[in-house]
Image: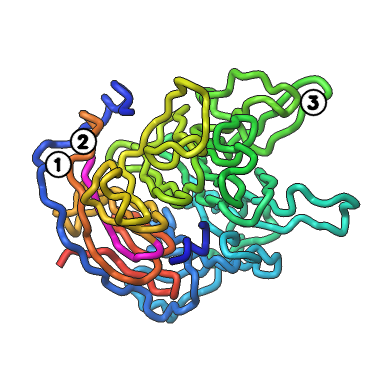
């Protein structure tokens, strides 16, 4: 089967701040069902959905072609309004690029600011040499229209960051504000296969990284004739912030974690701030990681918990919390041989809603190609996964999970259907 066509060691003491009742950990994993929401929204390839943090009950659905529509919670979607449209910028020119996510500023209810991630082709007409980076990823700030709360002001765009891309795949593409108020961005390794430029282990590039920036300030990088202005600030405790800039070729201060191949959907556990990420594998293994500041997750020396390419002798990498293989003959080599197979992980959420107590504390994730939805419980005190299993076997291609303001979780499908995850 094909890969997804919109993408392709315990650390002692780190999680001492996290706790979870033992009784909750011992609960069995429940079966789930999918309840349709917004059935009148039929356009294909919704890749992200967020509820506005302003109490209006508006869900913003992001489509890969470059549009965002608003549907009201509890409606069938027939009254949906177009909020944002950059289709004319052609952000979706191959399978894995496009308009990929939306993040609301923590002060959105009063300042109307939001942030999007989209992709662009670089202009060959203005270059007399072959383009080494024919594409770019754009992270921009926009503001809601002053006269219409259901429309974006496209003229308000402030480009925060542009990341040059060598190939059209492995874009990552999620933007999320963390509990610390900083904006987190997941970027893939730039594409093709085998990480041809070694981006995963190279801290001088933003590719194959989790980034963290401050949208409320601006700063500079470098010094002397190499000084350059940034449209964002660098958090003072980012792991490489004290490394020399070296004229733009030193370790990038925006980096929060590295060694990721293609982080396709990450989320914060709203109970404790733990950062979970589904990282799409290449030939054999898919993985779910618990991301920590300064963590090195191994790509492309490692794929999942397994050797992939030569690396420095004695180097240490953070292993996945969970992995699963592409083929059944590899199950015996897996961290959890009873997990089952898949081809492309879709990272999800730790359920913290109120409607279905049996799901409390379960990290919900899935696979694009097979459609299976799985779950596991994790003990933050012992740094161990304590139970895992299949929540629902189903066959639709999932593009993303979503979480509303109340902590309820949803599944978005490539065919355009959107479901709330429920317990029968």
Labels 1 & 2 near each other (Cβ < 8 A): yes
Q: Which residue is mark 2?
A: 379
Q: Earlier in the sequence, mark 1 or mark 2?
A: 1
User: Where is residue 286 shown, x and y percent of the image?
Assistant: 39, 49
Q: Is residue 369 magenta?
A: yes
73 relative position to 215: left or right: left
Colour basis = rainbow
The residue that appears at 46% across and 30% down in the rendered structure is: 296
Q: Which residue is mark 1?
A: 25
User: Where is residue 154 shown, x and y percent of the image?
Assistant: 67, 61
**Alpha carbon distance from label 1 to label 2:** 7 Å
Q: Secondary structure at mark 2?
A: strand
Q: Which residue is mark 3?
A: 226
The residue that appears at 54% across and 49% down in the rendered structure is: 111
Where does the N terminus fall, quadrant-wise?
bottom left
The residue that appears at 30% across and 63% down in the rendered structure is: 372
- The residue range painted magenta reads 368-379
**Alpha carbon distance from label 3 to label 1:** 52 Å
User: Where is residue 165 shown, x and y percent of the image?
Assistant: 67, 48
To which quarter of the image does residue 15 belong? top left
């Amino acid at each position: 089967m094909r890969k997804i066509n919109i993408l392709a060691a315990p650390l002692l003491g780190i999680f001492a701040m996290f706790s979870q009742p033992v009784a909750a950990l011992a609960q069995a994993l429940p079966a789930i069902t999918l309840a349709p929401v917004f059935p009148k929204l039929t356009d294909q390839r919704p890749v992200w959905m967020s509820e506005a943090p302003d109490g209006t009950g508006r869900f913003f659905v992001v489509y890969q072609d470059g549009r965002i529509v608003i549907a009201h919670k509890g409606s069938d979607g027939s009254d949906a309004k177009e909020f944002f449209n950059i289709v004319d910028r052609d952000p979706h020119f191959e399978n894995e690029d496009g308009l990929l996510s939306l993040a609301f500023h923590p002060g959105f209810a009063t300042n109307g600011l939001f942030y999007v991630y989209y992709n662009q082709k670089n202009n060959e007409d203005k270059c007399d040499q072959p383009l080494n980076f024919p594409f770019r990823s754009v992270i921009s700030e926009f503001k809601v229209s002053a006269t219409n709360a259901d429309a974006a002001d496209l003229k308000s765009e402030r480009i925060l960051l542009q990341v040059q891309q060598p190939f059209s795949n492995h874009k990552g593409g999620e933007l999320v504000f963390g509990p610390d108020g900083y904006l987190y961005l997941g970027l893939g390794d730039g594409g093709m296969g085998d990480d041809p430029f070694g981006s995963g282990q190279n801290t001088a590039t933003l590719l194959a990284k989790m980034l963290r920036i401050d949208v409320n300030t601006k700063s500079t990088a470098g010094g002397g004739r190499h000084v350059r202005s940034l449209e964002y600030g660098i958090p003072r405790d980012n792991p490489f912030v004290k490394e020399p800039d070296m004229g733009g070729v030193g370790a990038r201060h925006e980096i929060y974690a590295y060694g990721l191949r293609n982080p396709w959907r990450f989320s914060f556990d709203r109970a404790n701030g733990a950062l979970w990420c589904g990282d799409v594998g290449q030939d054999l293994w898919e993985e779910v990681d618990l991301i920590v500041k300064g963590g090195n997750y191994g790509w492309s020396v490692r794929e999942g918990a397994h050797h992939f390419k030569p690396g420095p002798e004695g180097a240490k990498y953070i292993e996945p919390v969970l992995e699963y293989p592409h083929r059944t003959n590899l199950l015996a080599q897996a961290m959890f041989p009873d997990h089952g197979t898949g081809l492309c992980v879709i990272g999800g959420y730790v359920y913290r809603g109120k409607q279905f107590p049996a799901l409390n504390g379960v990290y919900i994730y899935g696979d694009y190609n097979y459609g299976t939805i799985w779950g596991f419980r994790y003990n933050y005190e012992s740094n161990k996964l304590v139970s895992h299993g299949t929540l629902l076997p189903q066959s639709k291609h999932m593009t993303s999970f979503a979480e509303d303001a109340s902590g309820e979780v949803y599944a978005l499908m490539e065919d355009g259907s959107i479901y709330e995850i429920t317990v029968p």
